[in-house]
Image (cartoon, rainbow, N blue to C red):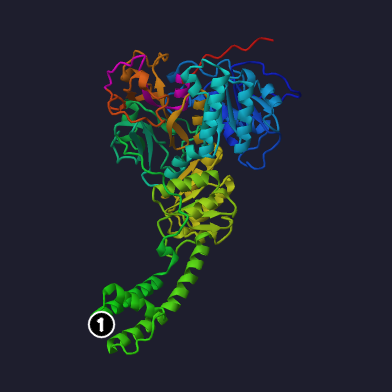
Amino acid sequence: MLGHVPPLPQQPQRSPFSGHMVVCGDDALARRLAVELRYVYGERVTLLLPPGRDTRSPELPLTGRGLAGLLGRMSSAMNRNGGNGGGGADALGDDTNAGVEAVRILEATEPSDEAFEEAGVGSAAALALVYDDDERNIRAALTARRINPRLRLVIRLYNRKLGQHLETLLDQAAALATPGLDRAALDASTTVLSDADTAAPALAATVLTGSSKVIQAEGLLLRAAERTPPGGGQIADPGLCTLALLSSTTHDPAGTEGSDSSGDEGPRLLPDERQVAAATGRGTIVLEAVSQAGPPGPPPRMGGRGAPLGQVFSRRLRWSALGVGLAVLALAIASTLATGDDPLHAAYLTLLDLFAMGDPAIGDPTARQIIQLLSGVAGLMLLPLLVAGVLEAFGSLRTASSLRRPPRGLSGHVVLLGLGKIGTRVLVRLRELGIPVVCVENDPDARGIAVARRLRVPVVLGDVTQEGVLEAAKIQRSRALLALTSIDTTNLEAALYARSVKPDLRVALRLYDDEFATAVYRTLRTAHPHAVTRSRSVSHLAAPAFAVAMMGRQILGAIPVERKVMLFAAVEVTGHPQLEGRTVEQAFRAGAWRVLALDATPPEDRRPHLTAPAAPAPDRPSGLVWDLHPGYVLRPEDRVVIAATRRGLAELLRRRRPVAPRS
């Protein structure tokens, strides 16, 4: 039975097979990744979890029964829908799950040598380290590289700069331990990913009306946009091509929001022309535009060490200082005209008189004496001005080190709940888009508090479930609510309270479980049929990228289609009979994949990954050809960019599984 999970072993034992995948983690991402590899890619998977229940992750208990339920729901959904939202099992040929053992679950407090030996890391093909703690992942990666130098490592790290250094270090260790390792294998030997970076763009896009997803590759920008359903009897504009049809019940309060259990009413990924023509009344996601990317600009400044002059001194004080300065200038000019003195010398004498440092003008002309008296009066005015400036500077510096409060007249902003790993990345993304944000966080020591302070983003400290907290964030004048705490019930409670304050508020929730998300969606749509409601799962958005990396590839990007995901990846044509020798039109498989572009770079000059920065070479023919003729025949040396469903990409990347030894 596909949903069956064998009992946990009572004593350490060696892995019964080789060439398998090992996933180590302590939260929802580990479980999602194991399900993705097992039921989408058809790989043998060993899942290494900490013993007992993880109290830090209330999304789903880490017990065999809870995991069995997740595996069973995923298995039935994949078998029923083919995992593609429209193609079905027939569109993909044979079953990837045929003859594959269920997920093997082990428990270990730490990813130690003994735990890795029991999981069979020494003979595994790939290892994913997706613990929530960066330090634990680094220690485990160093241990695994020592045990198996040829092992493909996929590591979850929040720290980007540290991840780059670690990836280089582990690749060097693999090259030294296995001389002669080919370039492609070495490049894929270590991949560092961040679930926060993967999910943040999609989460940020959910709060934008007419939101679009931008994917950059080889100097080009690919933009996919969501379009509302056309009028009665009309067909949605396909743009350059239609990537997905939204749920037929998206605007029906009793409908689902595109979960794996939504069936024929759910979204259809990569539909063919017949399905698009028949889908009247459905919203679409289309490939809207492809344009040249501008030169990379400097990274966005996350806040400076100093503060602008306008934020240190008040406007009244600045006007007062300007008035005193103009008075000094007028006195210097008057002194020059009255005494015929050199302008510089006259200005010098005026300043001496201003600071009461000059000699009395006894015996000088009357005009000079009057100017000296006026300079003294100006000096008396300067003293309180200097004192006020010092006091305001100290007060401004103290305020700059504290959190800002929402301004009194703020409106049209996004209220962001939760400043953990995910919330922090989403905050940075929203500020890059120039969207005003007000954050709500219960923990004053949360990871994103320092980032919000540097970005000078208003923050309300308090429990969002308490009355008055959302009002302090100006929820009644906001444009959207983005609830990204790690607790589903907290996100739901905040959304319900926000809707009671502003019924037409756009709401996006971070929810893990599909069944719970469907129930929440139906309830909110019934109560507020004219308001937009969205739910997203971070682990569901990030798991496909980690799974593709486990297969030795990297995706260019991902687009959420309700609660499903569409992937964009670069694929070598050689070795794929589904592509090789076929025209672009023949290679298209509805509900599975579509060829979007051709990499025109000669094979010897290609970079291993399109996401890597390219060295400037104007004389080298390169770039992606997006306007491919449907009759173009794909050659073995070609590399193409495809849009694919999870199951469709799994078939293209599927490797021949080693046969388990018989006992």
Q: Is residue 3 visible?
A: no
Please state, as top left, top right, bottom left or bottom right, where the N terminus lies in the image. top right
Identify the residue under disc 1. 339
How far from the left and from the top, in percent, is residue 253?
A: 45, 44
The image quadrant where one finds the C terminus is top right
* Closer to us: 32 or 172: 172
Residue 182 position within the rendered picture, expressed as x and y whole percent measured from the top left: 48, 17
SS class, disc 1: helix
Q: Which residues are magenta?
A: 629-652
**Where is residue 630 shown, x and y percent of the image?**
28, 21
Could you tell me if residue 187 is visible in this image? yes
Q: Residue at x 38, y 78 (%)?
A: 352
492 sits left or right of 224 in the view: right
Q: Position of residue 215 (x, y in %)?
A: 38, 35
Which residue sits at x=48%, y=39%? 197
Does the magenta portion include 648?
A: yes
Res. 141 image quadrant: top right
- Up-down: is 203 above or below 65? below
The answer to which quarter of the image holds residue 410 is bottom left
